[in-house]
């Protein structure tokens, strides 16, 4: 009876709804970059990158809280199986759709994939005491910085977050370190239940936040529909007021310099990247710099240009890889 009474807390629904709205705001910004209304690097750098991580952290924390509310006093296998099937099915659908829509950055383990697996793992540790859950969460969060093995670089283990060669993806939420937030959510809910905080929260009715609470109660539906709606609206808007044609050369120079500067001096990187652009323009192959999957001839040409520009700018053979000059960075 207690599990049933605490399984639906409107304040938590509202908090989940607020996280969904924040996610929609971030995705709208990402869509603006995708359509060319803003620089495509804006949503994935600086404050926007921090904003995205805060959204994912809060959403997964609430997943842990909800998991305890639903099953902390006894696992309800039927409802759990139904919910898991819905989330896993939606995750699979997203993988298939994005594989055809954006094959160079399709979603192979996004937040829905994570929630599906985290739900199973969460049940496995639900009975641990609060302090053990917190310690385990810390270990999961820290693991990606300390665990390295060549075996984990295989595609089979990309979902873990312990691989070093993961391909680009529009939504990548691996188990390490993100499952740590789910564990913290379980621990927080378990502590709140033992102290009576959950019972007090259950008595609060936030009548001023009905829309947020409604969105929180139907989070999966909101998640699946908000992006198609936003993309459809932006596509319609683009037919009336199309975005200005971006200067791809300038975008390349900025991205190339940023990536190169991670290991070399900025002065060298600017000269080196300009050399690559000049060589591409001279050969009338600027588009090759943005090719996601260059053929053998293009790859050979890129390697020759990178080698030549590295030497001309006092680089050393092998220090800058051809991939730093291709695939649009």
Image: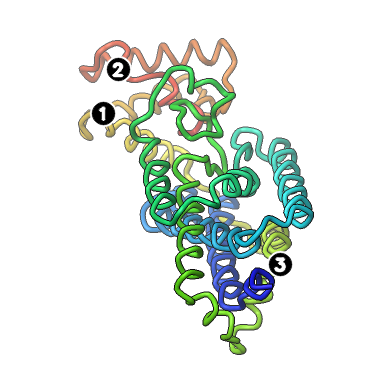
Q: Is mark 2 on a helix, strand or loop?
A: loop
At a point 33% along the width and 25% down the height, the residue shown is: 275
Residue at which label 2 appears: 319
CA distance separating discs 1 and 3: 46 Å
Q: Is mark 1 on a helix, strand or loop?
A: loop
Describe the colour scheme in one phrase.
rainbow
At a point 60% along the width and 60% down the height, the residue shown is: 72
Residue at which label 3 appears: 218
Q: Which of marks 2 and 1 is nearer the N terminus?
A: 1
In percent of width and height, residue 181 lies at 47, 53
CA distance separating discs 2 and 1: 9 Å
At a point 26% along the width and 28% down the height, the residue shown is: 263
**Could you classify mark 3 by the number of other residues whose Cα lies within 10 Å: few (under 14), some (14-19), or many (20 or more)?**
few
Given contact means CB atoms under 8 Å apart, are the residues at marks 2 and 1 in contact?
yes
In percent of width and height, residue 314 lies at 20, 17
Residue at which label 1 appears: 263
In percent of width and height, residue 238 lies at 66, 59
């Amino acid at each position: 009876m207690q599990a049933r009474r605490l399984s639906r807390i409107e304040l938590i629904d509202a908090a989940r709804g607020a996280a969904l709205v924040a996610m929609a705001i971030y995705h709208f910004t990402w869509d603006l970059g995708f359509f060319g209304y803003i620089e495509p690097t804006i949503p994935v750098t600086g404050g926007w990158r921090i904003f995205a991580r805060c959204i994912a952290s809060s959403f997964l924390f609430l997943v842990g809280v909800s998991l305890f509310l639903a099953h902390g006093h006894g696992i309800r296998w039927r409802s759990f199986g139904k919910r898991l099937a819905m989330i896993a099915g939606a995750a699979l659908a997203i993988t298939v759709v994005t594989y055809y829509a954006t094959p160079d950055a399709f979603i192979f383990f996004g937040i829905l994939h994570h929630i599906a697996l985290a739900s199973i793992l969460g049940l496995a540790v639900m009975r641990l005491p609060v302090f053990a859950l917190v310690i385990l969460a810390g270990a999961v969060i820290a693991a990606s910085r300390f665990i390295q093995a060549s075996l984990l670089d295989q595609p089979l283990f990309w979902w873990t977050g312990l691989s070093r060669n993961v391909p680009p993806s529009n939504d990548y939420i691996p188990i390490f370190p993100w499952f740590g937030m789910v564990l913290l959510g379980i621990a927080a809910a378990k502590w709140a239940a033992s102290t009576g905080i959950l019972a007090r929260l259950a008595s609060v009715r936030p009548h001023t936040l009905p829309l947020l609470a409604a969105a929180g109660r139907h989070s999966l539906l909101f998640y699946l529909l908000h992006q198609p709606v936003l993309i459809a609206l932006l596509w319609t808007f683009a037919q009336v007021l199309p975005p200005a044609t971006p200067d791809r050369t300038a975008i390349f120079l900025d991205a190339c310099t940023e990536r190169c500067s991670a290991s070399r001096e900025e002065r060298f990187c600017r000269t080196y990247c300009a050399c690559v652009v000049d060589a591409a323009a001279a050969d009338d192959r600027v588009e090759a710099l943005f090719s996601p999957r260059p053929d053998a001839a293009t790859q050979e040409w890129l390697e020759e240009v990178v080698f030549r520009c590295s030497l001309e700018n006092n680089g050393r053979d092998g220090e800058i890889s051809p991939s730093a000059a291709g695939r649009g960075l």
